[in-house]
């Protein structure tokens, strides 16, 4: 692919969600990347972890890590969609260095 870069997206979703709900959220965002012409290396759920500080009254959350390669416009769209999803507590998308 031309002009693609590698990214790492880490997002935290509500601890009240079931494993299948968490998996479907990960699949949704994987679909966003692939729908924009990117490729997802992996999207995996980590275990439920305690948060460093309370966010919106929550003390823990389900962490999901997604590694992907895409055009520069894809992380902005992914971030926009995560901001608009109430189940996503926090998210960060990092550009991976070679």
Image (cartoon, grey):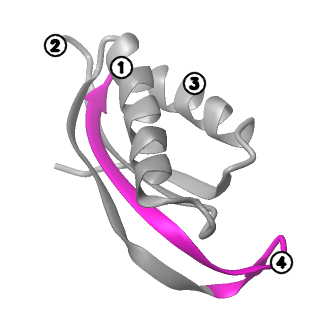
Q: Secondary structure at mark 4?
A: loop
Q: Secondary structure at mark 3?
A: helix
Q: What residue does disc 1 label?
A: 71
Is disc 4 in contact with disc 1, using a CB cutoff of under 8 Å? no
Residue 72 in sight in this render:
no
What is the magenta range?
Answer: 52-71
Q: What residue does disc 3 label?
A: 77
Mark 3 or mark 2, which is nearer to you? 3
Q: Is residue 43 above or below residue 80?
A: below
Asked where in the image residue 4 lies, by quadrant, the reply is top left
Mark 2 or mark 4, which is nearer to you? 4
Mark 2 / mark 4, whichever is N-terminal: 2
Mark 1 / mark 2, whichever is N-terminal: 2
Instruction: Kindly report the distance in space between the C-alpha atoms of the residues bearing marks 4 and 3.
Output: 27 Å
Instruction: Kindly report the distance in space between the C-alpha atoms of the residues bearing marks 3 and 2.
Output: 19 Å
34 with respect to 22 (left or right):
left
Tell which of 82 and 27 is nearer to you.
Answer: 27
Q: Is residue 49 magenta?
A: no
Residue 52: x percent and y percent?
62, 88
Q: Secondary structure at mark 1?
A: loop
Q: Residue at x 45, y 66 (%)?
A: 63
Residue 90: x percent and y percent?
64, 59
| Rendered image: mark on residue 1 | 2
Instruction: Kindly report the distance in space between the C-alpha atoms of the residues bearing marks 1 and 3.
Output: 11 Å
Instruction: Kindly report the distance in space between the C-alpha atoms of the residues bearing marks 1 and 2.
Output: 9 Å
């Amino acid at each position: 692919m031309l002009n693609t870069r590698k990214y790492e997206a880490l997002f935290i979703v509500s601890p009240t969600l079931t494993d299948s709900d968490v998996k479907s959220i990960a699949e949704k965002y994987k679909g966003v990347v692939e729908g924009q012409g990117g490729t997802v290396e992996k999207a995996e759920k980590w275990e439920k972890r305690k948060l460093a500080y309370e966010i919106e009254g929550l003390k823990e959350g389900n962490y999901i890590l997604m590694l992907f390669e895409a055009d520069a416009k894809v992380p902005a769209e992914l971030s926009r969609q995560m901001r608009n999803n109430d189940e996503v507590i926090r998210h960060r998308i990092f550009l991976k260095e070679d």
